Image (cartoon, grey):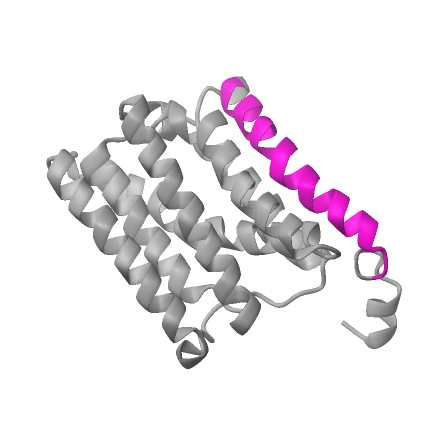
Amino acid sequence: MSLKGKASNPLIQNMKLKEFIGWFAAVIFPFAAMGISMTTGGGVIAALIYFGICGWLLRTLADSGMPYFNPKLRNVAKQLVRLAFVCVLFLILILTEYEFKAYPVLEGIMLVTLFVLPKGIFEQLVTANVYDLAGSRVKLSGYAAGILSSVMMYLLYWDKFITVSLMNGLVLILFQGVLNFFTINMYRKTKDITVCCIIQVLFNLAVIFFCGFGSIPYLVV
């Protein structure tokens, strides 16, 4: 986009508007995803609309490039060590509490294609977008909104498909919130979310193949 175009972009000029859009996306769009899922009778359409708007569209409106494939690992070495420690703790918990769940081949492929990969690619993009917008004036506000967006999506949307007890569901929410926190920290230093997207994909695989996923209501579109 030209410099003239950037100068006329209200999302760049108006900090209050950016902050409002960030919080609006964090709070309202999870409700919208729930409503679309209930209306259509399935989950894929709602998830794709949510990630399309809060992921791709917000990134486009904010006039920012996609934050992938330039991780600058040296800049976030300490963050990576801490995140690895959290992931190991989560892995131990998963292997201790759950057994591997098998799916029919076609169903497993569809879940990986329509849940694991899209959520892995776009979940942390939504976090970065919400942080950029809601935190345009106060960074702490961006952290809060970025983490809240995933918590809201779990409670209002993903909880309908992930088949775990309330207590174990809270563990999943906690890990997702911690991952979002690390995503924002690393994004601030590198403007990249590649590493956290990879971890998100692995997390999604753990949810599918160990915690359990009600695939039929999700895949019915």
**Which residue is at 54% across, 45% downward?**
51
Q: Nearer the viewer, residue 166 or 36?
A: 166
Residue 13 vs 32, above or below: the answer is below
Which range of residues does the magenta coloring cover?
Answer: 13-38
Residue 50 placement (x, y as % from top left): 56, 39
- Is 123 left, or right, of 91 in this rendering? right
Residue 4 at x, y percent in the picture:
88, 73
Is the stretch drawn in magenta largely helix, strand or loop? helix
Name the image quarter holding the N terminus: bottom right
Q: Is residue 214 in sight in this rendering?
A: no
**Quadrant of the frame with the C terminus:** top left
Q: Position of residue 215 (x, y in %)?
A: 30, 29
Q: Is residue 78 covered in magenta?
A: no
Q: Residue at x 40, y 67 (%)?
A: 79
Q: Is residue 17 magenta?
A: yes
In the rendered image, is residue 97 in sight? yes
97 relative to 117 in the view: left or right: left
- Residue farthest bottom in this picture: 74
Residue lying at 62% horizontally and 44% vertically, measured from the top left: 53
The answer to whether residue 72 is above or below residue 155 is below
Q: Position of residue 110 (x, y in %)?
A: 30, 40
73 left or right, relative to 35: left
The quadrant where residue 171 appears: top left
Q: Residue at x 53, y 65 (%)?
A: 187
45 lies above or below 204 = above
